[in-house]
Amino acid sequence: MADSVRSNSLSSYLVAEPAAATGHDDAVDHILDAVRQHLGMEIAFASRIADGRRHFTHIRADFPVPAAPGDSEPLEDTFCQRILEGRLPELIHHAPDHEAAHEVALTAALPIGSHLNVPLRLSDGKLYGTFCCLSRHSDRSLTERDLNTLRAFADLAAVQIETELKNSRAHAAAVERITGAIAHGQPAIVLQPIHRLDSNAPVGVEALARFRDSGHRSPSAWFNEAAGVGLAVDLELAAVNAAIQSLPYVPEPAYLAVNLSPAVAISGPLEALVDAAPADRLVLEITEHAEVEDYTALKRALDPLRGKVRIAIDDVGAGYSGLRHILVLEPDILKLDMSLTRDVDRDSARRALIHAMVEFARDIGCTIVAEGVESDGERAALRHLGVDYAQGWHYSRPLPPVAAQQYLLGVQTQSDSRKTIAPARRRSAAT
């Protein structure tokens, strides 16, 4: 009953805050446990001082206490304030011995016997909060050496807390950067033409994301950063939407290939975006670089789209799951990664591997597209091996949509493209 009264008395002036505000770090918890056990104390905590309140960031105790990380209380109602003002010493053997301690409700509510408290300062010398150990019983054996031990542990905790603060600021800045980019219509889209190898006729384009700072920061850096702060799907969906919006610049019947991670393929909004595109003019390229956590869910998400789009496996030969992507997802198109096509005219091992992939693709009714073709020698070797299509700087660099439209119309007429546009589908392989 007494414990319940004490708990109610203490909790009456504690305010719970969102968990995200605690900056919780397991390393600091370990430091608190270590110093608490070393000094033989029951409770250890770290706090942040802000806006006239003491905010508990970390609490470790031998018994349940009526406060938790994220709670806060008025600073004026704490030992911390009185110690910072010099009204209470940093080392207290028996709290009731000090008149200023009786002003704090916690002295009787917990109650507090022994108490050690030192400031937590960051590397720039600024006060962050306090680092404290206390027990319900008095301990007159505590010495200045014990207080110095607490200071040493506090310094270790301050390093960890400062690292966490830097990480939190970096996280917040990344979130602001990603959401701001999306709000301002990024990423933009450029289109790289895809050609037939036997006639050089352009048959489609791949949509590639570009950001306003592409001169010094790659698109992959943007997507990696988005993944690191939980916004990968949001940024990718923005890219997919922008890519589909570029379809009017792709002359019929050429197709538009859009890159897609497994996570976005599974996400709900994808089907609505696909529904807005004309049937048979959209290819979804599922990257092989990303791990697929649930193939069943991915296949379930893609199957309803097959009548509206074609499915391609991107980056074949450089991916995460190898042939499993192909066997489970049953694609219409396989795109050979540039790591396979690079110098294929001078590398017999690459030629042997691509020859095997071509035979495999024919057996399952897939079309092969080679990426990263940069020389006429590579183009000729790929054509000799039976690869159907190719893209790369040998043909064209990625172009803004209007320039890509002019390129496609200028290199080949629509009637020539129409005869070559439709890659063989899996279901025709058996006929």
Image (cartoon, rainbow, N blue to C red):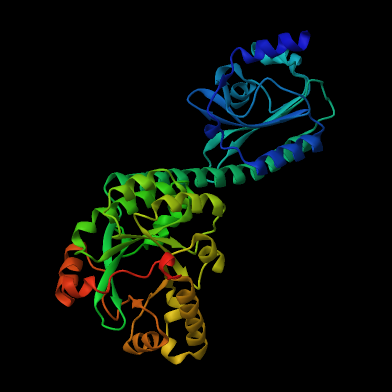
Q: Report x, y in % for residue 347.
A: 48, 89
Q: Is residue 181 visible?
A: no
Question: Which residue reaches farthest right?
Answer: 141
Q: Is residue 227 left or right of residue 145?
A: left
Task: Determine the image quadrant of residue 198.
Answer: bottom left
The residue shown at (26%, 76%) is 396
Task: Determine the image quadrant of residue 69.
Answer: top right
The residue shown at (56%, 37%) is 23
Q: Report x, y in % for residue 20.
A: 53, 34
**Nearer to us in this view, 118 or 381:** 381
State the quadrant of the N terminus. top right
**Nearer to us in this view, 420 or 183:** 420
Q: Is residue 52 visible?
A: yes
The residue shown at (41%, 90%) is 345
**Nearer to us in this view, 181 or 291:** 291
Q: Report x, y in % for residue 10.
A: 66, 14
Q: Is residue 419 left or right of residue 13?
A: left
The residue shown at (50%, 90%) is 348
User: How many numbered circles are shown?
Assistant: 0
State the quadrant of the C terminus. bottom left
Q: Report x, y in % for residue 274.
A: 33, 50
Question: Which residue reaches farthest front?
Answer: 431
Q: Is residue 297 left or right of residue 235?
A: right
